[in-house]
Amino acid sequence: MKKISILGSTGSIGKQTLEVIDDLTGQFEVLALTANQNVELLTAQVKKYNPQYAVLMNEERASELKYNLKDLQTEVLVGEGGLIKAATLVDVDLVVNAVVGAVGVKPTLEAIRVGNDIGLANKEALVTAGEIVMREATEYGVNILPIDSEHNAIFQALQGEEKEQVSRVILTASGGPFREVSAVDLEEVTVKQALNHPNWDMGGKITIDSATLMNKGLEVIEAKWLFDLDFEQIDVVVHPQSIVHSLVEYKDHSMLAELGLPDMKVPIQYALTYPKRKKNQLKSLDLAQVGKLTFEEPRRDLFPCLDFAYQAGRVGGTMPAVLNAANEVAVAQFLNNQLRFIEIPQIIEKVMKRHQPIITPTLDDILAADSWARKQARKEGDRN
């Protein structure tokens, strides 16, 4: 049995990871589960899976979790130290990092340093510290197995091929809920509308990122580090049906793509069972039923976050961390009805323009840039 630690078990990816484990009966043992503040769901998960450790990031509610689990042998840990403990258990075969935000960076690095393979759904680890993460993964011989459907598709399309033969990769984007709206319509977007993704079942923050195309921008930066590419080798195309999850073009102009229904359980399972594939009960893709697959250019004029990500990635250093932190703050303010949808990219652009990047940063430099950008983004948001 593979032993698994799940960081962010109460979020969308974490819950689906546990569903995959349920489907593959008897093949996995859960050693640790962590949550931000959802005590009720974490309690239920712990009672079902009986892990060695349960971690709650919210220290104010830790006593509540301890009381709920007082009759179990599961040890309750709190805060970042607990998160890192869950990531660095020596018996773990795979750490699934499904937390949202820059909080996922340190546990990723600490897991690598003890030799634990990573199933990575936390974009921010590579966006903010990709060079450090991939360098250390190579040094410690650790596999970084991407869970995002797009990077998982590229990872599969690269199997058995030589990296030197890759011409480019093409990330597909659904276009989000506002693919066909006008600039005027964007000014009136509500939170409810932005959370109504046409294809994927995701958490709130990622769903808003999909609507602004920032999600795809962050994936561009991820792809650069995961697959050792130049930004000129990474393209984005809008594919509304979300059937082709991404493509790899080789030097001979052959293209390999991974196709499937938009179900995150497929890439999650591939990361969990890698290098093997396991039979499951998920639905098969029926291309005749789908009928047609269409592709179009992103609307960069209305959704500038994609270009901001390319810009930040090309500058490098601390700039991607600033991009990510400013976006996190702006999205949170939008979700709290403190900003309009169209103001999200405006905040990000203002913060990026104020930043003086450190081109060869340490982790401390990156975390300091992250902290600075959050404060700056809140100031910009308060002015709006």
Image (cartoon, rainbow, N blue to C red):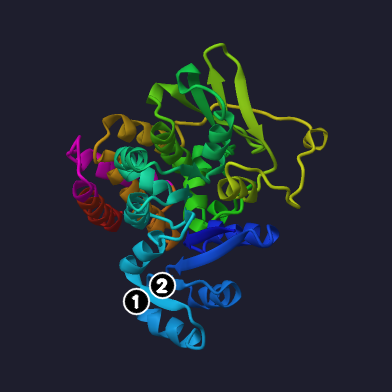
Report the quarter where the N terminus lies: bottom right
Q: Which residue is mark 1?
A: 59
Residues at discs 1 and 2 in contact (Cβ within 8 Å):
yes
Q: Is residue 210 above or below residue 80?
A: above
Looking at numbered disc 2 in the image, what kind of residue is underneath it? Leu
Q: As drawn, which residue projects farthest toward the right?
A: 288
Looking at numbered disc 1 in the image, what kind of residue is underneath it? Glu
- Relative horizontal placement of residue 168, taking residue 272 as reference (left or right): left
Disc tally is 2
Residue shown at 79%/32% (left/top)? 291
Q: Nearer the viewer, residue 236 or 162?
A: 162
Q: State the image quarter where residue 250 is shown.
A: top right
Q: Is residue 379 above or below residue 32?
A: above
Q: Nearer the viewer, residue 132 or 325?
A: 132
Please say whether residue 358 is one of the residues in the magenta stretch: yes
Where residue 129 appears, as percent x and y from the top left, is: 31, 43
Q: Which residue is mark 2?
A: 56
Where residue 171 appears, as percent x and y from the top left, is: 53, 32
- Relative horizontal placement of residue 277, taking residue 75 as reference (left or right): right
* Residue 15 visible in the picture: no
Residue shown at 58%/41% (left/top)? 275
* Residue 311 visible in the picture: yes
Check disc 1 and report its element: helix, strand or loop: helix
Where residue 338 appears, as percent x and y from the top left, is: 38, 60
Where residue 130 appears, as percent x and y from the top left, is: 34, 40
Category of crowding for the residue at label 2, using alpha-carbon neighbours closer than 10 angstroms: few (below 14), some (14–19), many (at least 20): many
Please provide the residue range marked out in magenta: 342-366
Q: Main secondary structure of the magenta part?
A: helix
Residue shown at 55%/56% (left/top)? 13
- Relative horizontal placement of residue 41, taking residue 144 as reference (left or right): right
Q: Which mark is residue 97?
A: none
